[in-house]
Image: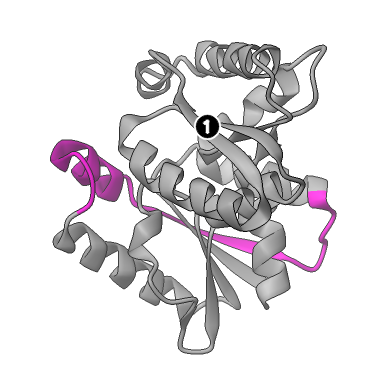
């Protein structure tokens, strides 16, 4: 099985390859495409617009010709996916998969984001999932984290996310979810609290299930 991943950061290639190794799916191969220009345009515009949506869907369509399922790994671009399939190929949003997993048991769910442009899309998809499954959802931005990521200070970036995870549990969260794929490495830094849920594993499992 071949799963195509559309990323907006090259560093997410390793994130998803690592996640694939952990879910133990030896028959699955990942095909990666990186389009940082799409996220850059969204950040400059302050969100999505028809041109960004067109370019994103064109990239997803091109990728679908090579694989059995397509995975959109950028939560900012998530709303560009309006159909669950391109032809016969399923299309999965990692944030949608994570939203379903994190809210399925109900309770209080705190969702952490690192970049402002993903706040709106993330809030909508997690709140909708929470309503369906009886969970209370709060979405937070990890302040000052994204400049660290953009500056290549990944260790400091992940440490800031891990600290935010601890604060969320201290505030009474039953589940903490890391909305952006780039945050996944922070899960390994969390000590003394439950491991937060991460979108790469959720997305990969959802894509395999869709196939």
Name the residue rendered at 79%, 17% in the picture.
193
Rendered image quadrant of residue 50: bottom left
Question: Taking 148 as reference, is 103 above or below it?
Answer: below
Give the left or right position of residue 132, taking residue 43 as reference: right
List x then y, in percent, for residue 104: 72, 51
Name the residue rendered at 43%, 42% in the picture.
123
Give the left or right position of residue 90, taking residue 197 as reference: left
Question: Taking 17 as reference, is 52 above or below it?
Answer: below
Q: Is 32 contained in the magenta span?
A: yes
Image quarter of the N terminus: bottom right
List x then y, in percent, for residue 151: 36, 17
In the picture of the structure, the residue carrying the numbered disc 1 is 138
Name the residue rendered at 62%, 61% in the picture.
30
Q: Is 190 contained in the magenta span?
A: no
Query: Looking at the image, can residue 145 be seen?
Result: yes
Residues 89 and 18: in front is: 89
List x then y, in percent, for residue 173: 68, 25
Residues 55 and 138: in front is: 138
Q: SS at mark 1?
A: strand
What residue span does the magenta drawing correspond to?
Answer: 23-48
Rendered image quadrant of residue 158: top right
Query: Looking at the image, can residue 94 be seen?
Result: no
Name the residue rendered at 73%, 66% in the picture.
28
Residues 105 and 47: in front is: 105
Residues 117 and 17: in front is: 117
Image quarter of the C terminus: bottom right
Question: Count of labels shown?
Answer: 1
Rendered image quadrant of residue 4: bottom right
């Amino acid at each position: 099985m071949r799963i195509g991943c559309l990323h907006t950061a090259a560093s997410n290639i390793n994130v998803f390859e690592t996640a694939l190794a952990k879910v133990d799916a030896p028959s699955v191969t990942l095909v990666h495409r990186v389009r940082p220009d799409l996220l850059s345009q969204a950040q400059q515009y302050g969100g999505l617009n028809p041109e960004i949506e067109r370019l994103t869907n064109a990239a997803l369509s091109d990728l679908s010709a090579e694989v059995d399922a397509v995975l959109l790994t950028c939560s900012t671009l998530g709303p560009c996916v309006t159909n669950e399939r391109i032809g016969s190929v399923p299309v999965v949003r990692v944030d949608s998969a994570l939203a379903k997993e994190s809210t399925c048991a109900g309770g209080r769910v705190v969702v952490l984001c690192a970049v402002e442009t993903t706040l709106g899309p993330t809030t909508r998809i997690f709140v909708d999932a929470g309503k369906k499954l009886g969970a209370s959802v709060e979405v937070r931005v990890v302040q000052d984290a994204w400049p660290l990521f953009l500056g290549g200070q990944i260790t400091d970036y992940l440490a800031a996310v891990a600290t935010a995870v601890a604060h969320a549990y201290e505030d009474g969260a039953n589940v903490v979810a890391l909305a952006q794929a780039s945050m996944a490495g922070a899960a390994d830094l969390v000590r003394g609290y439950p491991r937060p849920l991460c979108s790469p594993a959720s997305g990969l499992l959802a894509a395999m299930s869709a196939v």
